[in-house]
Amino acid sequence: MPARNLRRSTGSTDSLRYFCRTVDEIEHVMDEDQYTSETSFELRRVGGPDWQIPSEQNGHGAVVERMHRWDDGPEDFQYAERDYEDLVGVMTVRGPLAGKKGVQKRRAFDHFTAVVGKGGKDPGTQYLMTGGDLRIRTYNMMGEQFAFHRGDKSEEVHVQFRGSAIDMCEFGIFEKAPGEVTVMPRGVAHSVISDPPDDESFLRLNFYSAKPWRLPTDPTAHKYSSSFDVTTTVHREADWRTANTDWRATALR
């Protein structure tokens, strides 16, 4: 979502989204021709709140714009009333992505060329998006990661999307289930193993930041104890999976 672009989303009663804001503009977005498969997912939340869609929905006409600046606190907003027709379809994209689509959407788990996490700069995956101090990458690891390692130039946020895992670091061992997030500080040695090791469902989204993450709320102050059931539909299998029948054995080495 480009900077300066006003936006609004409409979701279902159980719509949930991960996002982060970056000061620097996004400079690189993975090309769509780098897809190797086509997959869709259905996530069902268990143990969450019973949200209901409000009876009145904002449509065309007057739109309330809510503005939040970098130095604002979690509850600091400014509000302004705009006309829908003055906002939609009038944006001009500037910056590194000028001349491209502006708003860009990618399938985050459809670009792998192998099972990753076995060393050698993670062949088989790539950065989905990069810009300034931010890098975004996904992983489809199976078994144990090749070694403990530490990020000397970045702090990591791990978002477990599918499959269970065990995160290991100098501070302890932590079980991870779909929907859970880990913040790994700079310089802390860590590794991960899929749980169980021969489970091939592991999918994870990682954010790497060269600047410390700011946590405006307490991530451990849970309001609910919910979990996610993930149903996967493979519309097109990746060639590297169908061509190499021994890829599971290779991933577990």
Image (cartoon, grey):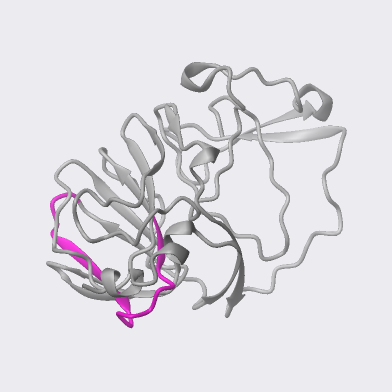
Screen quadrant of the C terminus:
bottom left
Task: Please provide the residue range marked out in magenta.
Answer: 186-205
Screen quadrant of the N terminus:
top right
Residue 144 place in picture, x, y as percent: 23, 72
Q: Residue at x 22, y 61 (%)?
A: 118
Residue 150 place in picture, x, y as percent: 14, 54
Residue placed most toward the observer, 225 or 72: 225
Residue placed most toward the observer, 24 or 119: 119
Using the image, determine if residue 206 lies above or below residue 198: above
Using the image, determine if residue 40 lies above or below residue 107: below
As drawn, which residue projects farthest toward the bottom? 196
Using the image, determine if residue 240 lies above or below residue 20: below
Residue 138 place in picture, x, y as percent: 40, 53
- Quarter-wise, where is residue 204 in the image? bottom left
Using the image, determine if residue 193 lies above or below residue 37: below
Q: In this image, 235 relative to 212: left or right?
A: right
Q: Residue at x 35, y 40 (%)?
A: 135
Q: In this image, 227 relative to 235: left or right?
A: left
Q: Can residue 160 be seen here?
A: no
Q: How many marks?
A: 0
Residue 8 place in picture, x, y as percent: 69, 40
- Is residue 62 on the magenta stretch? no
Q: Can residue 112 be seen here?
A: yes
Residue placed most toward the observer, 48 or 105: 105
Q: In this image, 41 relative to 22: left or right?
A: right
- Is residue 190 on the magenta stretch? yes
